[in-house]
């Protein structure tokens, strides 16, 4: 089988993350992955990506890459404002698409993107990486144990330094012309999607937000209450703070009628759990990884050792879908649903009213099967 020739548009923090894991996958599957071309307007970023990851061609502009490089798939990782144009161009060129989250600058723009890829028939995947987290996959399975009982409440906190500084250094995130918003849509969209993946679609949301750092249109605090069928309530808090030495962190706690499960690790780490009248117990990271490999086998064994690296598992699944002729999952329509939820939260925060999601603009016609990844 010929190598899958890959182009990368956007060689910043997330683009380089994808390049690194694709390079690793290529080492395990000799001759199956070719890092063909990279594009970035920043000369240092694109030249460094070429030198570090071995991209054969270098472009200033992503459109030039799509027109001139011979590629089979493209990873679209520039600022959010450019997602739509590159998705449209890649669909026109009949290139398989991996698009980073959030999908678009707005729900309306995202709906147009989903329709474009649907009409073109190109394979596509959205970068909602928490669906490939070892910790959250194992927690999700725990929730389905009869002894856990009916889920009653969820408390979810997600915080990181405002990503114009620190490890996620991306100055464009403070510019509303380039970003879809602030902490909720640009980061917490992962959390909204995770809650849908774990508990199904919420029926209503209530939101509150603040702008403390003072970047117009880019909020740094959002609180959300999500209601689900059956009475489950989930509270989500997203914060972008100004503590550059604080590690980006998520804390997820889930209470069932007779069970409790929680973790401070969003990819790989220990899980705390308790069932019935028994004591609280910690499931160590090594056992979490082993359980994850049983739920979601990662082959060959040399990659299975890296199954705790969610970005690697995510990108491997994309490539395996292309190699096997199946549809990558989650597709762009899943990203559109997460965008819809975020816009509902923003609408609620602006109006002070709870939003009934049954009457909020719906993405249902774009949804595929909600099978797990």
Image (tube, rainbow, N blue to C red):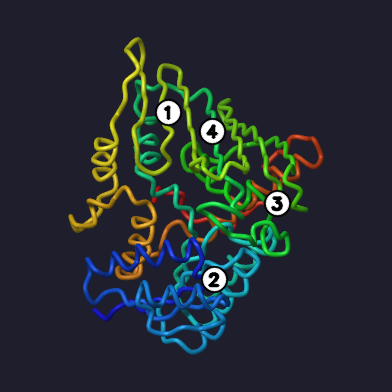
Tag 4–tag 2 contact (CB < 8 Å): no
The one nearer the camera, 334 or 50, is: 50
Quote the CA–CA distance across marks 3 and 2: 20 Å
Residue 117's tag is: 2
Instruction: Name above or below for residue 5 compared with residue 349.
Output: below
Mark 2 or mark 1, whichever is nearer to me: 1
Classify mark 1: helix, strand or loop: strand
Rendered location of residue 135, percent (x, y):
37, 39
Q: Marks 4 and 2: which is nearer the front? A: 4
Q: Quadrant of the N terminus?
A: bottom left
Picture layout, residue 352 above or below residue 56: above
Rendered view: 373 above or below 150: below
Query: Mark 4 or mark 3, which is nearer to you?
Result: 4
Q: Who comes first in sequence, dot 4 or dot 2?
A: 2
Q: Which residue is labeled 3 in the image?
A: 361
User: Would residue 253 be found to the left or right of residue 285 on screen?
Assistant: right
Give the number of the disc on residue 51: none
Disc 2 crowd rating (10 Å Cα; few below 14, some 14-19, many 20+) is many
Distance Cα–Cα, label 1 vs label 3: 33 Å
Which one is earlier in the sequence, the residue at label 1 or at label 4? 4
Q: Which residue is mark 4?
A: 156
Please state which of residues 95 and 173 is positioned toward the viewer in this rendering: 173
Q: Residue 102 sits in which quadrant? A: bottom right
């Amino acid at each position: 089988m010929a190598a899958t020739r890959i182009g990368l548009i956007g060689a910043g923090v997330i683009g380089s993350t994808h390049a690194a894991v694709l390079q690793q996958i290529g080492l395990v599957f000799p001759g199956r992955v070719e890092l063909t071309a990279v594009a970035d307007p920043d000369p240092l970023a694109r030249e460094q990506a070429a030198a570090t990851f071995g991209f054969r061609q270098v472009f200033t502009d992503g459109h030039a890459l799509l027109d001139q490089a011979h590629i089979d798939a493209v990873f679209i990782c520039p600022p959010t404002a450019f997602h739509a144009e590159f998705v449209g161009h890649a669909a026109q060129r009949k290139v398989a698409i991996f698009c980073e989250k959030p999908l678009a600058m707005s729900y309306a723009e995202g709906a147009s993107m989903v329709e474009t890829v649907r009409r073109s028939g190109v394979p596509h995947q959205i970068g909602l990486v928490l669906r490939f987290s070892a910790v959250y996959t194992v927690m999700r399975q725990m929730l389905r144990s009869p002894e856990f009982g009916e889920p009653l409440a969820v408390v979810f906190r997600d915080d990181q330094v405002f990503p114009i500084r620190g490890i996620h250094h991306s100055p464009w995130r403070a510019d509303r012309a380039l970003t879809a918003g602030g902490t909720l849509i640009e980061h917490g969209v992962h959390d909204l999607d995770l809650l849908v993946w774990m508990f199904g679609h919420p029926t209503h949301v209530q939101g509150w937000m603040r702008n403390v750092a003072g970047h117009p249109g880019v909020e740094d605090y959002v609180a959300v209450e999500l209601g689900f069928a059956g009475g489950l309530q989930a509270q989500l808090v997203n914060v972008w703070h100004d503590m550059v030495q604080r590690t980006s962190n998520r804390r997820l706690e889930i209470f069932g009628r007779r069970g409790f499960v929680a973790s401070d690790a969003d990819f790989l780490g220990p899980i705390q759990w308790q069932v019935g009248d028994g004591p609280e117990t910690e499931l160590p990271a090594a056992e979490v990884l082993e359980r994850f490999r049983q739920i979601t086998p990662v082959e060959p064994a040399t990659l299975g050792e890296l199954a705790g690296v969610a970005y690697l598992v995510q990108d491997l699944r994309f490539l395996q879908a292309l190699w096997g002729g199946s549809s990558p999952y989650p597709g762009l329509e899943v990203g559109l649903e997460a965008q819809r939820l975020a816009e509902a939260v923003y609408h609620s925060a602006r109006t002070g009213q709870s939003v009934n999601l049954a009457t909020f603009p719906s993405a249902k016609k774009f949804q595929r099967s909600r099978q797990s990844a």
